[in-house]
Structure formats: C-alpha cells, structure tokens
Image (tube, rainbow, N blue to C red):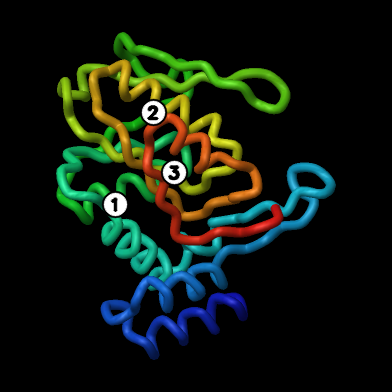
Amino acid sequence: MGRCQAEAQGRLISTGRAGLTPEDRHPDLRALIRTVPDFPKPGIQFRDITTLIAHGPGLAATIEALAGAVPAGIAAVAGIEARGFIFGTALATRLGLGFVPLRKAGKLPVPTIAEDYALEYGEARIELDPTLIDDGEHVLLVDDLIATGGTALAGVALLRRAGAVCDHAAFVIDLPDLGGADRLREAGVSAHSLIAFDGD
C-alpha cells in the first residue's frame, strides 16, 4: 500500500466511514486519486482513479457518497464504458437498481442506437440496446470524471432517444475549468460530483 493510501485509510478508519459527513469524506477520497503529470501529453495533469478503486474503504466511501446524492425516483443507473461501468455498477448494486451499459461501438450483439461525439483528434461513438429502457424511465448517468462534457452529453442524448428521462448525472471528479458540468446543466441535466480539481 502506498503512503498516500495508508494515510487516507487511517483517516477513514479513525473517523468511521458510516459517520463521515460529505465535507469530511471528500478530502479523504482526493488523497487516494493519483495525479500523473504530462499524460497523455505535456501540460496535462491526469487524474488517475486506479489508486482509488484499489483501496477498499475509499471505494466503499465513494459509492456511499454517490448513493447519498441520488434523487428520489431514479429507476436505473447508466454508465459509460469503461470507467463508468466501475462506479455505475457498484452504485446500482448499492441502490438495488438495474445497470444500463453505454458501450463503445461494435461491442453489443443486438440492434442498437448510437450517438457520435467529438474528441480532440476525431470522433467516437457510444451505443445502447434501447430495449433496456422503459419509456419515461428516470435514469441516472454515471461516469468517473466530467471534463469538457462531450461524452456525458452523448450519453444523455442516447438515453433520451431510447425514451429515458435523464436529467441527473453523477461523477467522482469534476474539472470545472473545462466547463463540462455547465454544459450538462444547459442541457437540463443536474450534474453532481464528489471532488473538483480546479485549474486542470
């Protein structure tokens, strides 16, 4: 176990996970997120959640914090491949709800609907089996991080095309300077995150 993990685990255990307030809990989670400089290119500070999900108490606290922010009436959780599957499936299990995967192109063996979105150098596509969504079903979109918001907006559009009501999204990390959460709000989606890294 790395030093930052050991220190954070000590804080989690000494406080007692069940008794943590959101204000107390989030700094502990921040300490478990590794920052990798100059990845994937110079000048980028990459926020790596690998160290968080490898830490049992930290991962459990993350899911509890996400669960505490889920509004009433949510009937399913949708996650974006790939890291959104980690938090989305765990959250759905915690809430006793089904999980709807938003897959990369070509991964589903059944007829799908698709949404394209822009990347820095090209385009990407996510796909959904629309039979997983009941018309009018309230679905929460989950991913690990919100940056510019392109992937999340594509996920919202895809869910809405399938008949879902998608007006809430949850993320572990927000990079507010990149404006993704604001773009979601402009699209009528309330964006909740546990941790914000300003200036990156």
Disc assigned to residue 156: 2
Q: Give, as a three-letter code, the residue at label 3.
A: Asp
- Estimate the spatial distance between the alpha carbons at disc 1 and disc 3, rounded to whole Å: 11 Å
Quick one: which residue is furthest to the front in this view? 186
Residue 79 sits above or below residue 53 on the image: above
Compute the Cα span from label 3 to label 2: 12 Å
Q: Mark 2 is on which residue type? A: Val
Residue at x-position 54% and y-position 68%:
30
What's under tag 1, amino acid-wise? Leu
Which disc number belongs to residue 143?
3
Q: Position of residue 55 (x, y in %)?
A: 46, 68
Q: Please tell me in which quadrant of the rendered image residue 129 appears.
A: top left
Mark 2 lies on a secondary structure that is helix
Q: Residue at x 62, y 18 (%)?
A: 123
Q: Which residue is mark 1?
A: 91
For residue 50, the mark is none
